[in-house]
Image (tube, rainbow, N blue to C red):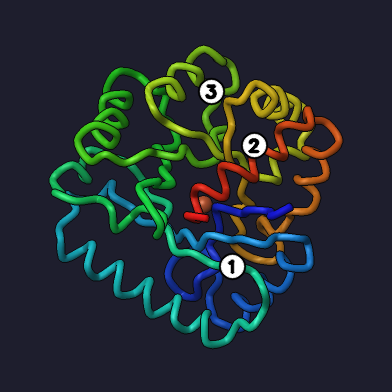
Amino acid sequence: MNKYDIHTHILPAIDDGSQDIDISVVLLEELESQGVTHLALTPHFYTQYSPVTNHDVKEFVAKRQNAYNLVKSEYSGSIRLILGCELHLTQNLMCLEDITPFCYENGRYMLTEMPYNCTFKSDDIKLLESVINKYGVTPILAHIERYPVLLKNQQLLEKLISMGCMAQVNTESLCKMFVGQKLIKYLNSGLVQFIGTDTHSTVRGCDFAKGYKVISKKCTPNVIENLSNYGKKLFGL
Ligand SMILES: [Fe+2]
């Protein structure tokens, strides 16, 4: 069974994750030893400071590609890698004509981070609808457990999923007592389609096996199959 980690900050020297190529290789080797077979490299792109220009996008894409080339030249393990981005979604993105450079490389899925204090009120919903309808892109909401309102209000998550969003949880959170139970319930209800380690370093993230073990133990058998099927789609397999 393939195992997909769709959220990491392993590309070197591009965000607050890995700071050099040696660390990147260590992190990949560690995740490989934990059973990850497919992994997406999703550096942060922040949009809260000013309207995003085509130049900003070009600069990001070039920097990301250079970091990726370095990883491909130094990492000789078996994990299949793809590029992506963790996009911080604000109104400042909306001046772009095309946001597909922020999508995972094989399609139109985009790992999307909302502002920390987001409560998914009407303006946030409108932004997500624009991503879906104006740009034809599927937002995958990163670490949904970060938003207290989504843990409290299952109907709100159901609404987001039914309007075309998808959801990712961090493996670390699955191991936490209260939050973990809630996320297991969401996984069993089909409200979460992806998991990721959100690996930044050997001590932040990097815990795929622990999270996966919780899923194997506590989720209904179809959850593992669903994670694998959604992962396949994301990786264009
Ligand atoms: Fe992240």
Q: Disc 2 on helix, strand or loop?
A: helix
Residue occupied by mark 3? 150
* Mark nearer the N terminus (3 vs 1): 1
Where residue 135 appears, x then y in whole percent?
Answer: 23, 41
Between marks 3 and 2 in the image, the one whose residue lies nearer the viewer: 2
* Mark nearer the N terminus (3 vs 2): 3
Between marks 3 and 1 in the image, the one whose residue lies nearer the viewer: 1
Identify the amino acid type marked 3: Leu
Identify the amino acid type marked 1: Arg
The residue sitting at 53% across, 75% down in the picture is 19
Disc 3 to disc 1: CB gap under 8 Å: no
Residue occupied by mark 2? 226
The residue sitting at 39% across, 47% down in the picture is 110
Tell me if residue 117 comes above or below residue 225 in the rendering.
Answer: above
Image position of 138 (left or right of 180) = left
Task: Report crowding for label 2: few under 14, some 14 to 19, many 20 or more residues within 10 A (C-alpha).
Answer: some
* Residue 171 occupies quadrant: top right
Where residue 119 appears, x then y in whole percent?
Answer: 42, 23
Image position of 20 (left or right of 218) = left
- Between 104 and 150, the residue placed more toward the observer is 104
User: Mark 3 and mark 2: span between their CA atoms?
Assistant: 21 Å
Residue occupied by mark 1? 80
Image position of 110 (left or right of 237) = left
Q: Disc 1 on helix, strand or loop?
A: strand
